[in-house]
Image (tube, rainbow, N blue to C red):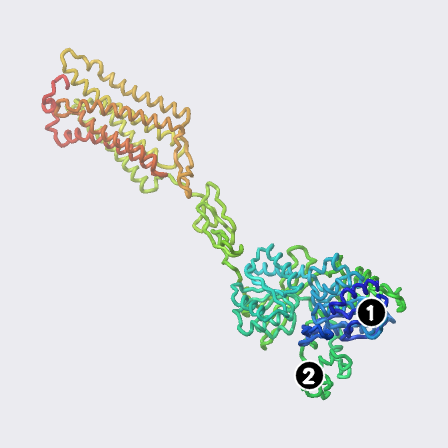
């Protein structure tokens, strides 16, 4: 193993990233760099390493290639919270060393490093820990040393943890991180010896996406650290968000070492955004810089959604921009005795380690040792400094979240060591323990400490549990972390996320803010995605005729069943209105009134004719056919009533057959009267006996014969394909036209054509007889009546075909009434006028005029 380390370090020595051991002869080890001293250390039988990001920057140096580069050194402000994490490792080891149950009689030691969150420093420290170069600074035989530590607690950041794990993996040195959450670290092929006590970002990303979906935010912005932590975490979140139907307006990345111009650009994007919710997957240091930049020109109020790295960091509370922020954090915990341990630090103890000296001097702004360069210009500490009065993240133990992860990681390693060196209550500190043995035992660790369960799955991850933390403004103006919900990945699907308290948002109210690209489409409309924009940006399009949507934000409208039609709001289907010519509507009443009036007129004329049946004018116009004609006209008027009302099977058959038969009867009577006129005048010729061949008996047979033909046509029509009630849904989409289907269109047009044929024949004969001599030539009036009849029924055809719905029936009734009134007025009105108002003309003498007596 040592040869492998030496070969690796020989390869890397030219980069000056590690205190490499390089030489021409691989058997001779010559130290080429200065080892990095641990920030805190304690000797013991077994050593546990620690790596924390106590500073955020690495001192930069311009290389001249003319002199040896200076040793790597951290710079920048100190993160007191990270210092608390490091001291949690010290506290846990102190507890274990004082315990009679865990590793009794064995003293654990530790070597704790400040990695500055820097990959070069993390790699340098990893090689020291792996090759036994911790405190042996001048031993030229150091290449022969085994690993300085059995396991490592750390690192805080994902990127340094990845670098360290890649180096530790080939040598089977286990690493248990308290804060590296990158989901990539669960890949055991790349990081076989990596464990962690904090959940993977795979779960946090899913939890954040589920929460965003829960509050119906579909239009968000995102910003993340340009590091393994931020890039991998945001990639997982964006994938989960896409599955939840969430759209992202922008996704920006920033890392604290990038140029200020990049920081300003990210801030400008946030200021210009239209999304009211921003998900920040950032490390604390990156988040602090972004908030400082935004504070110079505050953007409109927005709702911040945070990752665990910053959402529970007390130092972030000073930024009012984030009041109302919500995010998932590690569950808060209590570590008995830890607060007193932190405060039990004297100036003398602080002077033992430069890290604690720096902490003391930064906290109290005084110098413990004036000789140090850092202390220049500060007053000397006078011994009145009181840690109990100090208020900063180091002394704040009210929110022990990540601290508990360090505590659990240290105990996990201790339990693994115990399973190796202890047999019951007896432990042998002289047993040589290899890191590989600790690695194997860590896979099987399962214990409970302070009610906190500790175990690892096959990926080295714990069970994912989070608290939903809300930054709530208190009455005194302070901001506190308030737990308002939980997320437990072990629960059944869709039950992982729960709320148990009210959330106060950025505006101080409990009303959930709205963040959408487009307002929700109400029922009765559908979403139409705007071209070139995310699916969350859409227009609301009203459903087309005959379609509904009964859900908010419906993607499609659905057609109603044929018998149904949408309401005005187009959110439900209602039964279509059924339309037919009813007795209740004005049009039906008017037509029925005309029909009844017409029949009454016909009956009245018949009564007048009957009372004056002996008068010359009645006799002269063939009284028998006149009464039959009046009877048929009465039936014609009355048959129009069968067209009004809801169509039924019987009414549909009756209306068309009654219409056809009664009209043929009527036209047959008129035709008979016309033939009589013609025969009468031919009878005046010498030797003519025409009237004998067309007497009353023949007249009755002709009427019967013509009518019988129509009856046979109607019987054949009703037998083959009779009319029937039909719901017509083609003409109007929004209503049903209840009408009588003809059954056989041929039957209908044959019936109508036969009536037209008789009417045309009657017209021709009457036209021929119009100039026959007579003071009262009935042929003239028949000609006019047939002219009206034909005109009505010729115009009926296009009107019937083009009229919609119930108006088709109205046109047919109108044609019946118009032609009937035309016949009764042209044929009988002149006679009634003479009978009633000109009785002096109702004489044989007047009627004869030039007409020969045989014609009468």
Question: Mark 1: which secondary structure?
Answer: loop
Pointer 1 residue: 132
Vertically, is 845 above or below 596? Answer: above
Quarter of the picture containing the N terminus is: bottom right
Question: Which residue is pictured at 80% across the width and 62% down the height?
Answer: 171
Furthest-front residue in this view = 66
- Whichever of labels 1 and 2 marks the residue nearer the N terminus, that label is 1
Question: Which residue is pictured at 51% across the width and 63% down the height?
Answer: 274
**Which one is in front, 437 or 217?**
437
Question: Mark 2: which secondary structure?
Answer: helix
Crowding at dot 2, Cα within 10 Å, few <14 / some 14-19 / many 20+, comes out as: some
Quarter of the picture containing the C terminus is: top left
Q: Which callout, 1 or 2, points to the residue nearer the camera?
A: 1
Furthest-top residue in this view = 687
Place of residue 366 in the rendered image (x, y in percent of width and height, measured from the top left): 69, 85
Q: Quadrant of residue 772?
A: top left
Residue 557 showing in the rendered view: yes
Place of residue 115 in the rendered image (x, y in percent of width and height, measured from the top left): 72, 71
Q: Quadrant of residue 607?
A: top left
Tell me the tag on residue 794. none
Place of residue 727 in the rendered image (x, y in percent of width and height, measured from the top left): 42, 37
Place of residue 134 in the rendered image (x, y in percent of width and height, measured from the top left): 80, 72
> On the rendered structure, is 812 left or right of 14?
left
- Label 2 near label 1: C-beta < 8 Å? no
Pointer 2 residue: 364
Vertically, is 770 above or below 33? Answer: above
**Which one is in front, 671 or 12?**
12
**Distance between mark 1 and mark 2 Cα atoms:** 36 Å
Q: Quadrant of residue 27?
A: bottom right
């Amino acid at each position: 193993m040592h040869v492998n380390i030496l070969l690796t370090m020989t390869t890397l020595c030219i980069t000056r990233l590690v205190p490499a051991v390089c030489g021409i002869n691989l058997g001779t080890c010559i130290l080429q760099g200065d080892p990095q001293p641990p920030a805190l250390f304690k000797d013991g039988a077994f050593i546990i390493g620690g790596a924390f990001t106590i500073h955020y920057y690495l001192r930069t140096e311009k290389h001249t290639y003319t002199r040896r580069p200076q040793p790597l050194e951290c710079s920048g402000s100190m993160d007191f919270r990270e210092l608390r994490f490091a001291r949690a490792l010290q506290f846990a080891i102190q507890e274990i060393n004082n315990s009679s149950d865990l590793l009794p009689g064995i003293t654990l030691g530790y070597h704790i490093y400040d990695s500055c969150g820097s990959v070069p420093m993390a790699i340098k420290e990893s090689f020291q820990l792996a090759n036994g170069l911790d405190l042996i600074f001048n031993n030229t035989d150091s290449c022969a040393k085994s690993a300085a530590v059995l396991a490592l607690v750390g690192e805080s950041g994902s990127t340094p943890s990845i670098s360290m794990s890649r180096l530790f993996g080939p040598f089977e040195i286990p690493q248990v991180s308290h804060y590296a959450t990158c989901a990539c670290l669960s890949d055991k092929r790349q990081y076989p010896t990596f464990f962690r006590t904090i959940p993977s970002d795979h779960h946090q990303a899913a939890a954040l996406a589920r929460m965003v979906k829960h509050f119906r935010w579909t239009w968000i912005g995102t910003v993340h650290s340009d590091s393994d932590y931020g890039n991998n975490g945001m990639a997982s979140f964006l994938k989960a968000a896409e599955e939840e139907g969430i759209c992202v307006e922008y996704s920006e990345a920033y890392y604290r070492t990038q140029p200020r111009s990049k920081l300003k650009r990210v801030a400008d994007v946030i200021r210009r955004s239209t999304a009211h919710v921003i998900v920040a997957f950032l490390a604390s240091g990156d988040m602090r810089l972004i908030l400082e930049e935004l504070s110079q020109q505050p953007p409109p109020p927005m709702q911040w959604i945070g990752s665990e790295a910053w959402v529970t960091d007390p130092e972030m509370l000073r930024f009012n921009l984030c009041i109302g922020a919500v995010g998932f954090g590690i569950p808060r915990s209590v570590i008995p005795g830890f607060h007193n341990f932190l405060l039990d630090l004297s100036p003398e103890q602080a002077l033992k380690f430069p890290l604690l000296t720096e902490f003391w001097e930064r906290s109290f702004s005084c110098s413990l040792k004036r000789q140090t360069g850092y202390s220049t210009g500060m007053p000397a500490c006078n011994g009145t400094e009181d840690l109990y009065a100090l208020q900063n993240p180091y002394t704040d133990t009210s929110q022990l979240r990540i601290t508990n992860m360090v505590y659990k990681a240290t105990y996990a390693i201790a339990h693994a060591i115990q399973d190796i060196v202890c047999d019951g209550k007896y432990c042998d500190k002289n047993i040589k323990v290899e890191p590989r043995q600790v690695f194997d035992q860590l896979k099987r660790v399962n214990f409970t400490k302070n009610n906190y369960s500790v175990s690892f799955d096959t990926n080295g991850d714990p069970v994912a549990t989070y608290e939903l933390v809300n930054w709530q403004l208190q009455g005194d103006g302070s901001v506190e972390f308030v737990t308002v919900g939980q997320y437990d990945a072990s629960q059944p699907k869709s039950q992982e996320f729960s709320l148990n308290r009210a959330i106060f948002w950025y505006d101080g109210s409990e009303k959930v803010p709205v963040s959408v690209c487009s307002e929700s489409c109400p029922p009765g409309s559908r979403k139409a995605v705007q071209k070139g924009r995310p699916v969350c940006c859409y227009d609301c399009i009203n459903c087309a005729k005959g379609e509904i949507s009964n859900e908010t934000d419906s993607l499609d409208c659905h057609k109603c069943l044929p018998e149904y039609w949408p309401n005005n709001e187009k959110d439900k289907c209602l039964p279509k209105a059924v339309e037919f010519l009813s007795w209740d509507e004005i049009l039906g009443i008017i037509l029925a009134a005309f029909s009844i009036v017409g029949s009454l007129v016909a009956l009245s004329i018949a009564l007048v004719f009957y009372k004056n049946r002996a008068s010359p004018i009645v006799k002269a116009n063939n009284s028998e056919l006149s009464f039959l004609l009046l009877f048929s006209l009465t039936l014609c008027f009355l048959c129009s009533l069968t067209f009004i009302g809801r169509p039924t099977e019987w009414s549909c058959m009756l209306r068309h057959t009654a219409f056809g038969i009664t009209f043929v009867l009527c036209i047959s009577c008129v035709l008979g009267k016309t033939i009589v006129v013609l025969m009468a005048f031919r009878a005046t010729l010498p030797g003519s006996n025409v009237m004998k061949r067309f007497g009353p008996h023949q007249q009755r047979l002709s009427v019967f014969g013509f009518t019988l033909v129509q009856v046979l046509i109607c019987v054949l029509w009703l037998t083959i394909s009779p009319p029937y009630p039909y719901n017509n849904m083609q003409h109007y989409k929004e209503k049903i036209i209840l009408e009588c289907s003809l059954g056989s269109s041929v039957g209908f047009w044959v019936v109508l054509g036969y009536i037209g044929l008789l009417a045309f024949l009657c017209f021709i004969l009457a036209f021929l007889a119009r100039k026959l001599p007579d003071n009262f030539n009935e042929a003239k009036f028949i000609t006019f009546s047939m002219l009206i009849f034909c005109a009505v029924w010729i115009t009926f055809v296009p009107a019937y075909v083009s009229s919609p719905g119930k108006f088709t029936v109205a046109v047919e009734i109108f044609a019946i009434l118009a032609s009937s009134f035309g016949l009764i007025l042209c044929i009988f009105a002149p006679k009634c006028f003479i009978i009633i108002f000109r009785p002096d003309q109702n004489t044989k003498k007047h009627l004869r005029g030039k007409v020969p007596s045989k014609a009468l």
